[in-house]
Amino acid sequence: MLWGGAIIQLFTCMPAHFDTDAEDAKLKSLREQEEEDLARLLSDKYGIPYTDLTLIPVNADALRVISEVDAKAAQAVAFEKNGKHLSVALRSTEPDATRLLLEQLDTQGYIVEKFLISERGLNFALTKYADLSYAEQSKEGTFTINGTDSGSLSTITELKAHLDDALGAKKTAQVSHIFEGVLTSALAMKASDIHFEPEETVVRMRMRLDGQLTEVYTFDPHVYRLIESRIKILSGLKLNVVTRAQDGRFTVAVQGTDIEIRTSIIPGNYGESIVMRILDPNAINHSLNDLGIHPKLLERLATEIHRPNGMLLTTGPTGSGKTTTLYTFLQEVHTPEIKIITIEDPVEYHLPGIVQTQTDGADYTFATGLRSILRQDPDVIMVGEIRDAEVAEVAVQAALTGHFVFTTLHTNDAAGAFPRLFDLGVDPKTIPSAVSVAMAQRLIRTLNPETRTMRATTDQEKELIKHVFAPLADSSLIPTSIDQVGAEGPDGTGYKGRVGVYEAIFMDDQLAEFLRTAPSASDIAKEAVRQGFLTMAQDGILKALAGQTTLEEVFRVIDPPRH
């Protein structure tokens, strides 16, 4: 009886139901983890980076490079393609079929970056061949946006909701959907840059909207690593390089327009920081009248840029719109009878009918490139930036020998362009014959015409306005009423778009004589007052008085003259 009672007690203690499904799932998960661990060990052995294709989207254009039959035979799948750069995932480098495939890709001109994957990852990627007949082949080296409605992502609030929904699905395959949404929204909001900034527990994403960095979203570090991999692959960068800076580029196709994205990655304390600069070709489709240049200055500039020889210098900090201004000038002077060549670092926008060249930092520098350009018999030359004495000297000589040169300098104002040339070693006696115009510019935010209002100026503001305009030689440009200025709407979000504020100094006999003594920038500015053109501060105040912007915005960008 005791033995029988023990048996009864034993069965009583056993669970009523053994969950075989849960155990099977657990065993399957363990086996998959063992596969991935083995792939990582082989990765270390062969010195080839590991990847998991169940987590990274497989690009249809890349998949087409290797046929399904060859992929199965070689146990290899191409998963990303950017021009001739091809990312290929391998089970092993040993099989003859694998080596033969890699040789064929090399013969076809592909630059192959190899990755090791598990058998599970390979089988998952092979299933993607079934979807090829439904996938549209995109233009070489181009990321096509077509799955997201840009009209629904035109505000930060809408983008946040989109990202919350995508991340709520908790599917790593959503990374393409997330990244596409970010790009689509950035383009809809006319952002100039997208910044990913890893911190200790989150990764912050900010966008530069109307020149101001604006916080948009924070990602979990795990999600960011997937986004980072996607960006690196698209930009033709190495996934396994995380301790040094990398620069790349890719193209986004949106409704028939190709928009170039410049990618910059630098290592940081908590991961790699990424900045993507958006170069929308529509940003340079401006006429001279669209730039916001005051009519008096615009009339004079329109004459100066058509001279057969000379130099126009435009100055200002990075992001002040210098490139857009010069490209607009080039388009204005371009005719079939004129040969225009540019040398840039890098070429930011492509202009039809104009020969554009790019420095490589080694053999083809600004100086060597400029000398080569002069042998091509151009009428007009654009030099992206005068950075050193050699470039300055060659550019000045070009302006003296029958060419018109457009170029830029990094100085604070128009008067500062001349001392900068002195510092670079240019002979002060040659500058008057070479330089026709020295300009300076900034970009200020403009008020939304649908929500902007006007407010009364304070007594202190009136005194400042009077002080700023006091030196102006042309009294017709002094505002007659300073009682009201532009103001934001009641919601405090009244800015939309940007416009330039400008100043310029033109070469004349009196200024030429004055420059022979290599005077300071402040002395040159005082001498140029007699020409009667607006300074940037005066130009900005006139725009505020007209309701285009606010005084706060003007003096955020431009230092008011001191009493």
Image: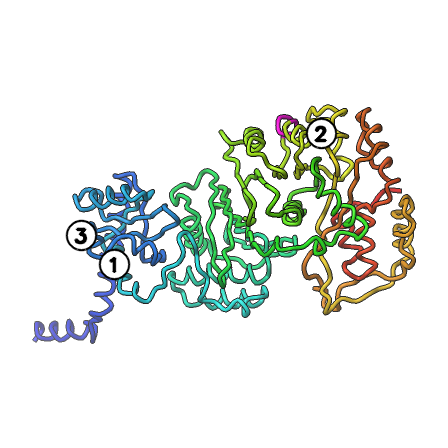
- Point out the stretch of residues depicted in magenta: 388-393
Asked which quadrant contains residue 524, the reply is top right
Instruction: Please give the label number shown on residue 126.
Output: 1
Asked which quadrant contains residue 543, the reply is bottom right
The image shows residue 259 at horizontal and vertical percentages of 51, 55
Which one is earlier in the sequence, the residue at label 3 or at label 2?
3
The image shows residue 238 at horizontal and vertical percentages of 39, 43
Front residue (pair 332, 562): 332
Q: CA distance from mark 3 to mark 1?
A: 11 Å
Q: Is residue 389 magenta?
A: yes
Give the structural element (helix, strand or loop) at label 3. helix
Q: Is residue 93 above or below residue 191?
A: above
What's the amino acid at mark 3?
Answer: Ala
Quadrant for the C terminus, please.
top right
Q: Residues within 10 Å of mark 1 (few under 14, many from 20)?
A: some
Left or right of 241? Residue 305 is right
